[in-house]
Amino acid sequence: MRSITIQGCLGLALVVCTLAGLGYVGFRQLSMRGTQAEARLMLSYMQTLQNVYHIEQGQFARFDQFYGAPLHGEDHCEQPEGAARLGFLLHGCHDLKSPAPRYAYRSLPQIKPKAGYRLEAEGGTDAQDRSLVCFGADDRELWVAEQNTEIVAVQSCW
């Protein structure tokens, strides 16, 4: 009768370990999708704002300095002039009730020869250069969108 109890405990321990492993994987997947959704949503929003700005002004708005999450521990919540002209406002920077942004954003000239834009979303980092987005402290996250292209992860920690 004791051997059944020991086998039952071993079986229960195996089930618990398996469920814990699946729970961890599920948590990472959920975290990854949520983090990626923020970057993709904000870059899509910026693309829409750029298209409207281009229709109204005949050019694209640029802001080379990052706006949003801290990078290397430096605050980037001051809205650049180009972001203000574009109408791009991050509520986490300007509203204490909103969660802080996890990415810093900027709008650059397109790398390709034609006059367009390149939008970037870089994962924030603290003063010790540890990632605020990724599970690994040294990992980095960079999303890019160019005019008339899809949003892609250039560097991903997932």
Image: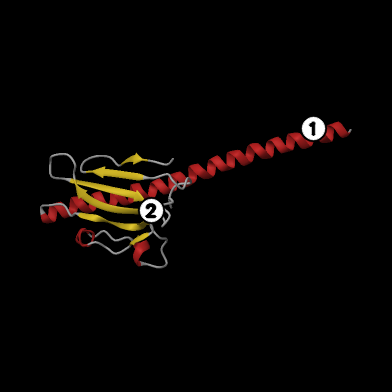
Looking at the rendered structure, the secondary structure element under dot 2 is loop
Q: Is residue 51 left or right of residue 22?
A: left
- Residue at 40%, 60% in the rendered image: 100
Front position in the image: 50 or 68: 68
Q: Is residue 108 above or below residue 90?
A: above
Asked where in the image residue 80 lies, by quadrant, the reply is bottom left
Q: Is residue 137 above or below residue 113?
A: below
| Residue beneath disc 1 | 7
**What is the CA distance from the residue labelled 1 to the residue labelled 2?**
49 Å
- The number of numbered badges drawn on the structure is 2
Q: Is residue 75 above or below residue 59?
A: below
Asked where in the image residue 5 lies, by quadrant, the reply is top right
- Label 1 amino acid? Gln
Furthest toward the left, the residue is: 58
Locate residue 73, reporting x and y percent: 39, 58
Locate residue 135, reporting x and y percent: 48, 46
- Residue at 41%, 57% in the rendered image: 127
- Label 2 amino acid? Gly
In the rendered view of the protein, which quadrant contains the C terminus? top left
Q: Earlier in the sequence, mark 1 or mark 2?
A: 1
Locate residue 129, reporting x and y percent: 41, 52
Q: Is residue 142 left or right of residue 81?
A: right
Give the crowd class for mark 2: few <14, some 14-19, many >=20 residues within 10 Å: many
In the rendered view of the protein, which quadrant contains the N terminus? top right
Asked where in the image residue 101 lies, by quadrant, the reply is bottom left
Locate residue 42, reporting x and y percent: 32, 52
Q: Is residue 37 left or right of residue 86?
A: right
Give the crowd class for mark 1: few <14, some 14-19, many >=20 residues within 10 Å: few
- Residue at 54%, 40% in the rendered image: 25
Looking at the rendered structure, the secondary structure element under dot 1 is helix
The nearer-to-camera label among 1 and 2 is 2
| Residue beneath disc 2 | 124
